[in-house]
Amino acid sequence: MIDHSPDGKAVELWLRSFDPMTAGPAHDRALEFVDRLETRDSIDSVRVGVWGRAFQRTDRVRSIPQLERIETTIASFETWADRTGRQLEPFFRMRHVESKLTGETFEICRLPSIALAEYRGGNVVHVAPSRDGDRTIDVLDRLEALVCGEATDPTLAFDDSSDRSADEQPRRYRRGYPR
C-alpha cells in the first residue's frame, strides 16, 4: 500500500514478470536496489507490483481489482506527465483498435517490462521510464540515484530540503494519451 500521509515517501516498482526466462538481469538489479531502498529511513514504503505486457482499457477493468489497480496507476502516471511536461511515450504505448467483426473500438495500453514510481503523500512525484525533452530517465539509473542519495531534482527527489512541491512546478505541454 502506498503511504498517503502528507509526508509519506514511497517507491513502487512494476515488473512485467518474475519468469526467469523473461525477467533477466535488469529485473534482478532493480530488485536489489529495492531491497536497499527498504533500509533507508527517508523512504516510508516500498512495493513491487507485477503487470502483463498490455491490457485493454475498458469499463470491465473496474470489475477486476488487479486491472483496476493498473489502470489507476497508469492514469496517475499520465496526470503526473501532464503536470510536469514529461513524456511517457514510447515506454507506455497506447493503441486504438477497431474490431472489423463487431465494429467495437477500444484502447490497448502496452506496458514497459520495468517501471518505477515515486510518491510523496500518495501523489506521484516521478515516473521512470520517461522522457524530459531529449533526456531519457531510465529505471535502473533512477533507482541507483535514489539508493545513493543522488536524486537531486527537488520535484523528484525524496529530499526534505525541497523548496517547491511537485504541484508548484511549471506546467509544460506534452502529447498525452487519448482517453
Image (tube, rainbow, N blue to C red):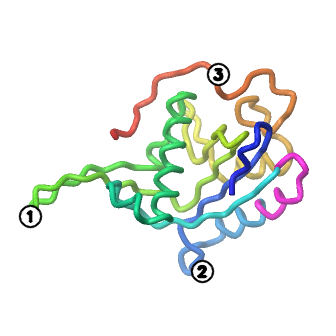
Q: Position of residue 84 (x, y in %)?
A: 57, 28
Amino acid found under the numbered disc labelled 2:
Pro
Residue found at x 81% / y 64%:
35
How many numbered marks does the figure carry?
Answer: 3
Quarter holding the C terminus is: top left
Label 2 to label 1: alpha-carbon separation: 38 Å
> Which residue type carries mark 1?
Leu
Q: Mark 2 and mark 1 in contact? Answer it, CB < 8 Å.
A: no
Q: Label 3: how many residues lie within 10 Å, few (<14), some (14-19) or many (20+)?
A: few
**Mark 3 vs 1, N-terminal side:** 1
| Amino acid under disc 3 | Gln
Q: For this rendering, which residue is in front, 22 or 43?
A: 43
Image side of residue 45 versus residue 176, left or right: right
Query: What residue is disc 1 on?
Result: 101
Asked whether residue 42 is drawn in magenta, I would say yes
The residue sitting at 10% across, 56% down in the picture is: 103
Q: What percent of the width, then of the height, locates residue 138?
A: 63, 48
- Please name the residue that numbered disc 2 is placed on: 20
Q: Which residue is mark 3?
A: 169
Instruction: Find the magenta span and give its range.
Output: 34-43
The foreground one among 80 and 128 is: 80
Rendering quarter of residue 102: bottom left
